[in-house]
Image: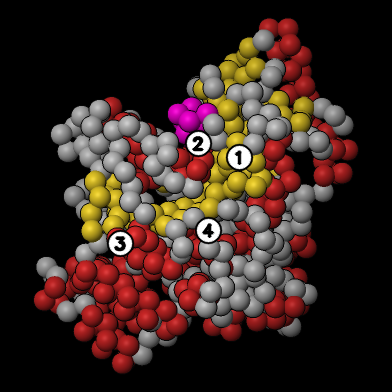
Amino acid sequence: MGTCQKILAATLLVGILQATTVASIPTQAGTSNTIRANAGDIVDTGYAKYLGNRSFPNTVAYLGLAYAEPPLGDRRFRAPLPLNETRVREETGGGVVDATEYPNFCVQGPIGGTDMGGAGTEDCLKINVYAPVGAARGDDLPVLVYIHGGGYVFGNPANWPFDHWIHQSPNVVIASVYYRLDSFGFLSHPQFRDGVVGDNNAGFLDQVEALKWVQRNIAAFGGDPEKVTINGESAGGGSVLFHMVAHEEPGLFSGAIAQSVDRAPTPLPEQQEPLFEFYANATGCGEGSLEDKMACLREASISTLARAQEAARTFNNPYHGFGPIVDGKVIVDTPTISILKGDFADVPLIVGSTSNESLVGGTDLGAVMKATFPQLDDQDIAEFEEAYPLSDFTSASDQVSTATGESLLRCARESLGSLFTRSFTYRYNQPNPTQSGTAVQHAAENWMMFKGINTGVNGTGEFTPMTPVETAFAEELIAYWLSFVRSENPNTFKLERSPVWIDYTGDKERIVLQQDPGNRTTVSGSFVENEPAKERDRCAFVQSKAKEEQN
């Protein structure tokens, strides 16, 4: 449905609502579920009026609001332009825009296997806003801005809904960001530094522009732009880390929650240039000057670019993935080095990981570490083998999983927890019940926090029913998270049954988050533990290798 059609449909609906008060609206095209929308569920940002979903009696979801100009045509591979509010005001003409359905997501990259990616749209710079019913300008509710994970390759915010978070705690406003992914968001080249033919880190700059939109507009939804916590998991957690070290406009956020921080290498554009050339050749755009190649790439179809970025997965080069780089402008150094130099936003922080997560397998520690972190040399590998002796593990695969897992994900907990003035750390210890085995794998907490979601290929996701015990544990997690958003402390508004979460910067204690082993809904299974000394020593070693690992 086009914008004008959506405005007309929403305006007609408002007329009906004024006469009948309540109407049923499909939640998504092709589904049988309905929500109830009231005439009062309209927010006026000053440049547009948006009609949202009454998804719970106390919750409204405003879905697919543009926060930047569409990155189409010559804007492909460039930094986003701020939303032209004058254009939007003229196009809407004072009518009400229907914001009751999730928008089309950003073009997806391949997850793996036979998945080729390619679903989605480039006109995707949108944001979903979830607010309490009746929230209005002047309420000054604290704000959570969520940045989804997916390796900077895939992800659809519709798979991480927040209606039930507001329903549980109708005293916050939550925004969830769509940003360009894979080659569409992170194509890079050394000559992009001057911004003439392209921009490095376009997908990350999308996130920055979304945070600026929040500063300008969240008050219309009842939010307080001076009290914004950014949150993300995996690549979303990595994005949170990048925002904390980025040279971006100050004051965009005042707190951070970083889950399973993706700490893959952050290369220089020169190290990504071979990938650019491979990609250009794979699209048939490999001839001529850089300007010629970029002009060709901007004319290429989405499917052509999707096939090229899928082929890049098997590119025989140490740097074969599209993601954030050290661009010298906004991201001026690798994150850990920036923090060690004191060049970061030292805001209150929650940071943690799951118990067993790792993204890389194998049995040859040296070979796997070298493939994962290309700048490690033979001396570095020897030191890793000394820090991770096989005798400390049940098998060679356990050794590799732990070593790569700590460098890529887990050690952000100890490293950031130690370097920030105020931090709370956690170990998430509840397996995803739809996965086999007892290991608590990467993203296990997403299943619990987002109504039993498992993400699939090309923006899809499958929700599975949760038991009362699982639902009770999810409520415990959400309470901790939103307590931190409201007060910079996870304990202030925690559930009564939940244990006190000790500040890590004191005795190096962390909370273990898990449901009650006795399968009771009224008892918490979470507890506080001392950080294991051996793990702390290994993570201190990993931090000493931050330059070589480029994380």
Q: Do the residues labelled 1 and 3 touch (CB within 8 Å)?
A: no
Residues under numbered marks 4 and 3 in contact, where contact means CB atoms less than 8 Å apart: no
Say which mark, if any, is on residue 459.
none
Tag 1 near tag 2, CB within 8 Å: yes
**Residue 104 point in image, percent of width and height:** 61, 42
The N terminus - image quarter? top right
* Residue type at tag 4: Val
Q: Position of residue 345 (x, y in %)?
A: 56, 64
Which residue is labeled 1 in the image? Answer: 128
| Residue most extreme to the top | 19
In this figure, which residue is indicated by the disc labeled 4? 347
Q: Is mark 2 on a helix, strand or loop?
A: loop
Q: Which of marks 1 and 3 is nearer the N terminus?
A: 1
Q: Is residue 390 magenta?
A: no
Of the two numbered discs 4 and 3 on the same chain, state the one appearing first in sequence.
Answer: 4
Q: Distance between the residues labelled 2 and 4?
A: 24 Å
- From which residue to which does the magenta span run? 160-170
- Residue 263 point in image, percent of width and height: 43, 68
Colour treatment of the image: secondary structure
Q: Helix or strand or loop: what does disc 4 sit on?
A: loop
Q: In this view, does 107 lie to the left or right of 5?
A: left
Q: Give the residue pinned by disc 3.
A: 508
- Between tags 4 and 1, which lies in front? 4
User: Dot 4: within a 10 Å radius of its alpha carbon, few (fewer than 14), some, or many (20 or more) residues?
Assistant: some
Residue toward you, 143 or 174: 143
Q: Residue furthest front?
A: 506
- Taking depth in this image into account, of 400 and 6 the one nearest to the observer is 400
Q: Identify which amino acid the numbered label 3 is placed on.
A: Lys
Q: Name the residue carrying label 2.
A: 162
